[in-house]
Amino acid sequence: MIGRVLIAALAGCAAFAQTPGELLKEPPVRAALDAVRRNEPATIDSQVKICEIPAPPFHEEERGKELKRLFEQAGLKDVRIDRAGNVIGVRPGKAARPNLVFSAHLDTVFPEGANVKVTRQGSVLKGPGIGDDCRGLAVMLGVIRALNEAHIETPGTITFVADVGEEGLGDLRGMKQLFHETLKGQIDKFVSVDGTGFGITTLGVGSNRYKVTFKGPGGHSYGAFGMANPIQAMGRAIAKIDAFEVPSQPKTTFNVGRVGGGTSVNAIPFEAWMEVDMRSADPSALKTLDEKFQAALKQAVDEENKRWNNRRPVTVSAELVGVRPAGQTPNDSAIVQTAVAVSRALRLQDTLAEGSTDSNVPMNMGIPAITVGGGGVGAGAHSLNESFDTTDSWKGTQRALLLAIALAR
Ligand SMILES: [Zn+2]
């Protein structure tokens, strides 16, 4: 995940039939929380083992197979791998609904061949993906184990999912498959455990990403002078994009991130391209920005062609290379209030955050969803030097456990 902290203090929580504070007094819940703490060394061991199985973008199969084996070993029912590669296992409750999906992502940002060996120095683990999201996968396993050891039967059902395609151009394809096909209409609440710390992500920043290509006939810079120029057309487009005014609440952004094209200093290019990223947590702000962007491309090409009297004109095409839906789970919703109450019952610092995570997909559909950190202290996410400090990391597993128990009802 990529995110940032929004605010550090939260409003008081609403009344519940059974508050997380009350749940905490129930002997089976206490037993499960104790099991989590006792089992944390094993949870950390699985975090390391899972992380040493490579899971580059679009190639999560090997790590997925291991999660399938671990789900089966933990006694989950109906364990399967769906068409996208999501690993799914069910822990039935007294009733089929509500169905809480509890997930963590399999994929990393690291390419095939990256050294995924994990090293330990004291309490610190080092290895690519160790926090994001091997921590989430391990926490999920720790939660299942504790629920089993304490013989907890939840009123509703928990479906555990180790999903694919969370990062980068994975484009949330695991979540899109899960919500639109595999478990379509069967998910009532959603929690993903992503990364480290104790943040609660409630704002899902969406993005549209394009590769834009400008084309023209091209020719000699001197001999063919007088024809429209794809790079110059692109320059006009970039100037227009640069002048966009965007809302600051919610934060809405644009960026021309890469450009290329042309063959020689003395040739009118036949092609130019650029990559553009636009983001917002507000779906309508993102749509408005996208429309301005499309209009800017068209205007830029029209102006360039007009400038050269429409002789051998330039054309433009924009290919959508990434879409992450935007959304938000309101701070006063039951799921956010429960998560806050759970953190407080365990005396943990609660922080609300925004980010681009698996929760974007359910948030966009209006399904209650949050993404939470898996505890411990992480550093260097998305870098080969990523590290995870395991000091008191059991607190993160405990919070995930109490959250699962409190929401599966
Ligand atoms: Zn992540």
Image: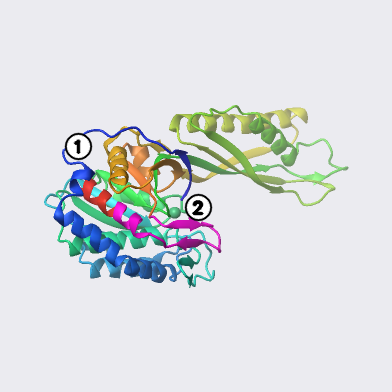
What residue is rendered at 32% in x and 39% in y?
Answer: 336
| Rendered-image quarter of ligand 1 | bottom left
Asked whether 64 or 104 is in front, the reply is 104
Q: Name the residue under label 1.
A: 16
Q: Mark 2 points at which residue?
A: 169
Q: Which amino acid does label 1 sit on?
A: Phe
- 258 is higher (above) or lower (below) than 164: above
Question: Which mark is drawn over residue 4?
Answer: none
Q: Does the residue labelled 2 lie within 8 Å of ligand 1?
A: no
Q: Does the magenta stretch include residue 386?
A: yes
**Scheme of image coloration:** rainbow
* Residue farthest toward the right in the current orientation of the protein: 222
Q: Which range of residues does the magenta coloring cover?
A: 375-399
Q: Quadrant of residue 366?
A: top left
> What x and y, as percent, mark residue 385?
55, 63
Q: What residue type is labelled 2?
A: Leu
Asked whether 291 or 71 is in front, the reply is 71
- Dot 2 falls on a residue whose secondary structure is helix
In the picture, measured across the screen, residue 178 lies left or right of residue 77, that is: right
- Dot 1 falls on a residue whose secondary structure is loop
Q: State whether residue 85 appears in this view.
A: no
